[in-house]
Image (spheres, rainbow, N blue to C red):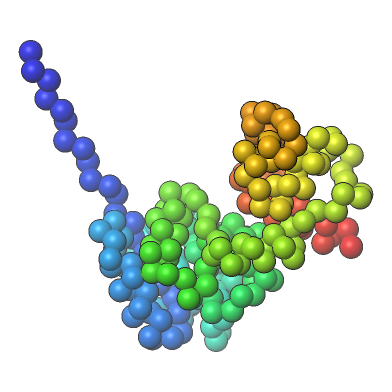
Amino acid sequence: MALTSLPQSPPQVVRVALVDDDAFVLTALRAYLASSERIEVASTFNRAADALAFLRRVPVDVLLTDVRMPGMDGLALLSRVRVEHPRTAVVVLTSFDDDEAMLAALSQSAHGFLLKDSAPEEIVRAVLAAADGGTTISPTTASRLVAHHLRPARTGARSDITGAEQEVLALLCEGYSNAEIAQRLVVAESTVKTHVSHLMKKYGAASRLKLVVAVHREREAAL
C-alpha cells in the first residue's frame, strides 16, 4: 500500500509594525522586510503614539521601533506595549551604540536591540527570531555589553552561588559558549549545562542573555 505524504502547511506569516521618525529609514526597513516571504509589514509610523493607537485595533507579532524619537520615545513605547500587548514582541533599533538604552530595553524584555547600520538580512533574522520568542543583539553591541557591563566581580559573590557555578558564570558573562567553558574548566559540557540551568533558576532568568543582564543589574544595585 503506497503511503501518501501530507502537504506541509506554509510557515506562518509574521505581521510587523515599524516606528521611526525618519521617513527614509522607514522606507528602507519596509524594503528589507519585504525581501522575506514570511514577513508582512502591517503599517509604518513616524510617531510612537500613533503606533500604540494602531496596536489597539490591529494586533501584530513584532514591533520594530527606533529609540530616539520626539514625544514618546522607543523605550516608553516598549514599556507600554509590554503591558498592553504582551504577545507582541518588540525589537529596538537605534543609530546610537547606547549601552544604557540597550540595558533598559533588555530589562523590559525587548526581543532584540539592533543598530541601524545592521545588514538587511540581520534585521530580517532578528524579526523572525523575535516572532519565535528569541532575542537578538547586534554583534558589536553584544561585545560592548560583555566587555563593559557583564563581567561579574569574583568578590562579593552571592551566598547561594557555589564556587563551580561562579566560575561558569564568570566565563558565561565573558561570552563563552557551554563547550568553550567546559574546555577551559576541564569538565564535561553536560556539567556546564547543569550549572547554567541552576544559575538561571537562582537568578530567575529565562535565558542565558537574561541571566547576564540580571547579574549586571544586581552589581549595579550593590554599588
Instruction: State the residue at coordinates (67%, 66%).
Output: 144
Image: 76 above or below 222: below
Query: Position of 166 compared to 127: left or right?
Result: right
> Within the image, what quadrant is residue 69 found in?
bottom right
> Within the image, what quadrant is residue 37 found in?
bottom left
Q: 131 or 114, which is in the foreground?
A: 114
Q: How many marks?
A: 0
Query: Position of 40 compared to 205: left or right?
Result: left
In the rendered image, residue 21, in percent from the top left (x then y), is placed at: 46, 84
In the rendered image, residue 143, in percent from the top left (x then y), is placed at: 64, 63
In the rendered image, residue 2, in percent from the top left (x then y), is placed at: 8, 18
> Within the image, what quadrant is residue 166 found in?
top right
- Is residue 185 in view from this perspective? yes
Q: 30 or 48, which is in the foreground?
A: 30
Instruction: State the residue at coordinates (63%, 51%).
Output: 209
Quarter holding the N terminus is top left
Quarter holding the C terminus is bottom right
Instruction: State the residue at coordinates (54%, 79%).
Output: 95
- Is residue 211 in view from this perspective? no
Query: Position of 70 compared to 155: left or right?
Result: left
In the rendered image, residue 123, in percent from the top left (x then y), is placed at: 42, 65
